[in-house]
């Protein structure tokens, strides 16, 4: 039995954490869904990935780690800002996110995802 490996595009060779970039791409793809805000468990996973696990709030620090250039930094920063705005104060329940708030998150997620996939995408193989 062989293990699952992940292959990365050659453009990612300079990144310190290409697997985190691959994971970010998956989360951005999910965040594009207009109704994702209604699934609070998925929003919580996204929140944990962005703010707790990797602190994408400081996107400029991700340059060379998971992001390749300034354009990617700015695209992800716009997504993070929109997501943080939709979340509101930490005392606001996730179920209180509105469709209008999430529409901005989904739009910025789409732009960030499109920006990042210009440098290739990774895939899994057995």
Image (cartoon, rainbow, N blue to C red):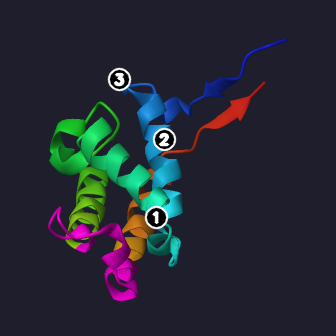
Which of labels 3 and 2 is toward the front? 2
For residue 17, the mark is none
- Asked whether residue 118 appears in the rendered view, the answer is no
Query: Quick check: is 97 in the magenta stretch?
Result: yes
Q: Quadrant of the N terminus?
A: top right
| Disc 3 to disc 2, C-alpha distance | 14 Å
* 102 part of magenta stretch: yes
Where is residue 32? Give x, y as percent. Answer: 49, 69
CA gap between label 2 and label 1 equals: 12 Å
Percent coordinates x, y for residue 69 in the rendering: 28, 45
CA neighbours of label 2 inside 10 A, class few (<14), some (14 to 19), many (20+) = some
Residue 23: image tag: 2
Residue depth check, mark 3 versus mark 1: number of the one nearer the observer: 1
Q: Where residue 31 is drawn, which disc sits there?
A: 1
Query: Contact, CB < 8 Å: mark 3 with mark 1?
Result: no
> In the rendered image, which quarter is residue 105 located in?
bottom left
Q: Earlier in the sequence, mark 2 or mark 1?
A: 2
Dot 1: within a 10 Å radius of its alpha carbon, few (fewer than 14), some, or many (20 or more) residues? many
Residue 38, can we see it? yes
Horizontal side of 17 relative to 39 (left or right) equals: left
Considering depth in this image, is 43 or 61 the residue closer to the camera? Answer: 43
Seen in the picture, residue 83 relative to 61 is either above or below; the reply is: below
Rendered position, 107 above or below 112 = below
Q: For mark 3, what is the residue? A: 16
- Seen at 37% across and 73% down, the residue is 95
Query: Residue at position x 38%, y 61% from top?
Result: 112
What are the residue bounds of the magenta stretch? Answer: 86-104
Quadrant occupied by the C terminus: top right
Q: Secondary structure at mark 3?
A: loop
Considering every residue shown, the one lying at the far bottom of the view is 100
- Residue 6 horizontal/vertical position (percent): 63, 27
Q: Quadrant of residue 49?
A: top left
């Amino acid at each position: 039995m062989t293990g699952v490996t992940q292959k990365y595009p050659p453009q990612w060779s300079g990144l310190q954490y290409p697997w985190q970039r691959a994971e970010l791409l998956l989360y951005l793809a999910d965040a594009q869904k207009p109704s994702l805000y209604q699934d609070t468990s998925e929003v919580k996973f996204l929140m944990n990935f962005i703010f707790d696990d990797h602190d994408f709030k400081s996107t400029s620090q991700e340059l060379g780690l998971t992001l390749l250039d300034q354009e990617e930094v700015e695209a992800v920063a716009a997504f993070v800002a929109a997501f943080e705005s939709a979340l509101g104060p930490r005392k606001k329940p996730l179920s209180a996110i509105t469709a209008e708030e999430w529409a901005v998150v989904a739009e910025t997620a789409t732009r960030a995802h499109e920006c990042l996939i210009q440098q290739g995408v990774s895939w899994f193989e057995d």
